[in-house]
Image: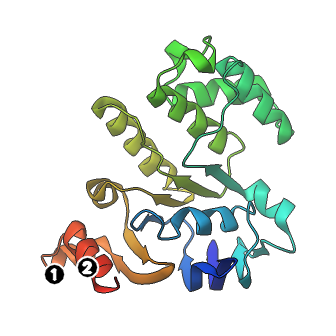
Amino acid sequence: MSIVVSNITKEYGKQKALNKVSLSVSSGEIVGFLGPNGAGKSTLMKIICCYLPPSEGTIKVCGLDVMEQSMEVRKKVGYLPEHNPLYLDMYVKEYLEFVGRFYHLQNLNKRVAEMVEMTGLTVEQNKKIGQLSKGYRQRVGLAQAIIHDPQVLILDEPTTGLDPNQLSEIRALIKELGKNKTVMLSTHIMQEVEAICERAIIINKGEIVADNSISDMVKKGETLEKVFQELTKAVK
């Protein structure tokens, strides 16, 4: 398993953002992580990426404990947060080179060129990030998440702000990346999960309420949107 989450609880004072959450994601799997606003999606993703410590429980990424081996975990994880933090005064290529140096990448210029082409940034690569549209900023964020060729990708709302053409291209890229990486992504777009994910995990009020394969739902004649609505209403 690439990601193993065991009984994770996260508390902020008296409020529980996560309550004994357990799940696992296999190598090479693309999983959609769904839930209403405030359900705990981003909190769990941040804990997996070593940005937040859990209050209780354990998480292992590629067999490494996120608390005891956090620096090793970070080398194996690519993370695109929901609110994509970028240095707006830096040029696209300059920023990707900056990120690449953190990972001590060899052939840095070649790798940056590959990322620019892969994420569709060729036309915009010599612009400052602050001059880019929201959609192209998302592409820069995705490029920085994969520049070090991580085994695991954690993508929090990766298609936010993309127009229909960009959306199709980024979905195709995520599917391609999922052929040899583990991908966990959150989104509010049900059709997106059905289009690119093999499995959907639904969380509500800090607890996992469903974990089903997309193909099983299709066989039962169910839509993800219907399942989502029923389960998130059921625990209110």
Q: Residue 183: x, y in percent?
A: 53, 59
Give the structural element (helix, strand or loop) at label 2: helix
Q: Is residue 205 above or below residue 112?
A: below
- Which residue is rendered at x = 71% and y = 70% of the image? 62
Left or right of residue 22: residue 91: right
- Which residue is rendered at x = 40% and y = 68% of the image? 35
Query: For the view shown, which residue lies furthest in the front direction?
Result: 14
Q: Residues within 10 Å of mark 2 (few under 14, many from 20)?
A: few
Q: What's the residue type where badge 2 is placed?
A: Asp
Q: Which residue is at the front of the view, 48 or 216? A: 48
Q: Is residue 109 above or below residue 33?
A: above
Colour convention of the picture: rainbow
Q: What's the residue type where badge 1 is placed?
A: Lys
Quarter-of-image position of residue 226: bottom left
Q: Is residue 113 above or below residue 64?
A: above
Q: Quadrant of the C terminus?
A: bottom left
Q: Residue 147: x, y in percent?
A: 68, 39
- Which residue is rendered at x = 60% and y = 66% of the image? 43
Q: Are marks 1 and 2 in contact (CB under 8 Å)?
A: yes
User: Residue 220 has which mark?
Assistant: 1
Left or right of residue 20: residue 89: right
Give the structural element (helix, strand or loop) at label 1: loop
Q: Is residue 60 above or below residue 181?
A: below
Q: Quadrant of the N terminus?
A: bottom right
Left or right of residue 206: residue 110: right
Q: Which residue is mark 2?
A: 216
Q: Residues within 10 Å of mark 1 (few under 14, many from 20)?
A: few
Q: Residue 168: x, y in percent?
A: 32, 38
